[in-house]
Amino acid sequence: MSDFTPALDIADRIRRGETTAQAVVRAALDAARGDPFNAFTRVFDSALDDAQGVDDGRLTGPLAGVPFAVKDLFDVAGQITTAGARLRIDAPAAVRDAEAVRRMKAAGAILIGTLNMDEFAYGFATVNAHFGTTKNPHDPERLAGGSSGGSAASVAAGLVPLSLGSDTNGSVRVPSSLCGVWGMRPADDTIPLDGVFPFVELLDAVGPFARTSRDLKTLYEVLSSTTLTGAAEGLRVARLDGFFERNAAPEALDAVEAVMTHLGSDLVAELPEAEGGRSAGFLMTAAMGGALHLNTLRARAMDYDPAVRDRLIAGALLPSGILAKALHYRDIYRQTFARLFDRFDILVAPATPVSAPRIDQATILIDGKPASARANLGIYAQAISPTGAAVVSAPLKTSGLPIGLQFIARPGREGALFALMHRLEDAGVLGFTEPGRRS
Amino acid sequence: MDDTAYTALREGAAAYLHLDLPPECEAGVAENLALLAKHAAILEQHLAEAEDA
């Protein structure tokens, strides 16, 4: 059964003795076993033992007794990390927890299972040839987004209040947008990647999901071992134009407009280099992902998800000179992007160009032409990944299908970023809406 | 990407990567190579603009 109670409220209720961690975790395990959206890939009954530790007072922390689940690319001691791949189902079990999982457990959170994803995190759909398609809780005929689709859908469906995913080119921001939950791509090097199955070393980031901005902030603080401070007053908030508007559907443009109107800001940030930045990230991903998988492709190409296999092989064939150019442009782009923060504090752009497409919808319009929906859901997120900035993907409060916005800050300004998120959530401009409560 | 270029890439793969492309992959790999070529062209354009600036 779904439960939409925020994580911090759950922790408070347990702390005050109004419920027990075991009761909370038992309910979450039951909900996960009955998951109708194919978000979960495994459920851990041992979570009840961990919950007993909270009730006994042995496990404490800001998230004591709060259930969570992880994308199936985080190492969990004693479990096989499949990374969504059939060819890893006989891999050796992980010896220890990923560092992000360890930090969650140290904060008292209870791991109840693993979550579906695009194979090896290479996709924006969570359409997985081996583990099935994760459905959007707001409309099961629609995509949940990817590659962390199980992470977003499990939170949106009220199966868990918190989850972990990863974001290389938008794999947190795309599914959080389509499922209407809060997500974050942290600034580079703020959350350790130890024990996370790699994809593109220079772009990979651990990313949390939650249903409120305050839950997300606490989750980020736990994962990054920081305490944030900052105020929303006086922030110069600008919308990114040009590339970030060109292919946006009306719902994405309206979302940006709603925020800017509420804030009374008409600031516009121009970034004509964004298209080049996106292409640099796209090429880096293909080349570095292909190189990472080359040995396995030589031996077991036919065991891959066909769509992922073909992308990886193409990437492996990319001349190294192109990768060198992509890396060079990435450096130029990062410097150009960083200069925007001399004039602005927070940048706003759509997280996805459209709300969730139907699962059988093959194309969306890109530059006026039909293009693969699954490949292009991440165009705006991909353009931000190479910058190394901190990004919160926030759901617009809407009666329609969910759509998310990227709020982007200079690394180190996460406190101000979250202060703005709290303000916009409190004002009813941003926020999660339970599935089934839309008009 | 035309057939000649793709054939050259296949041969390059065999020679340098020791990666024999299964026939089932050909259409998908060719489609993805075309997409990568498009992004490489965009990258070249932006690099040229950056060098001119």
Image: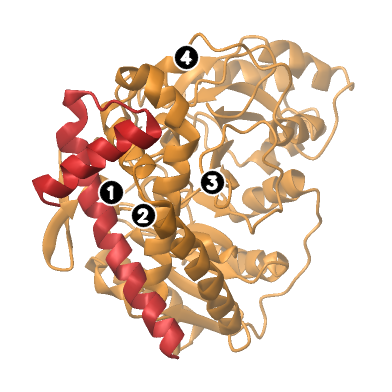
> Marks 3 and 2: which is nearer the front?
2
Residue at the spot x=28%, y=67% of the render? B41
Q: Choose the circle earlier in sequence order: 3 or 1.
A: 3
Q: Choose the circle earlier in sequence order: 4 or 3.
A: 4
Q: Residue A378 carries which label?
A: 2
The amino acid pointed to by label 2 is Gly
Q: Mark 1 points at which residue?
A: A375
Q: How crowded is mark 4: few (under 14 residues within 10 Å), some or many (20 or more)?
A: some
Give the residue at the far front of this rendering.
Answer: B15
Host chain of mark 3: A
Q: Do the residues labelled 4 and 1 touch (CB within 8 Å)?
A: no
Q: Name the residue under label 4.
A: A33
The front one of A310 and A159 is A310
* Marks 3 & 2 on one chain: yes
The amino acid pointed to by label 1 is Ala
Asked if A299 appears above or below A237 in the picture, the reply is above
Quarter residue A426 falls in: bottom right
Count of picture labels: 4
The CA span between labels 4 and 1 is 31 Å
Host chain of mark 1: A
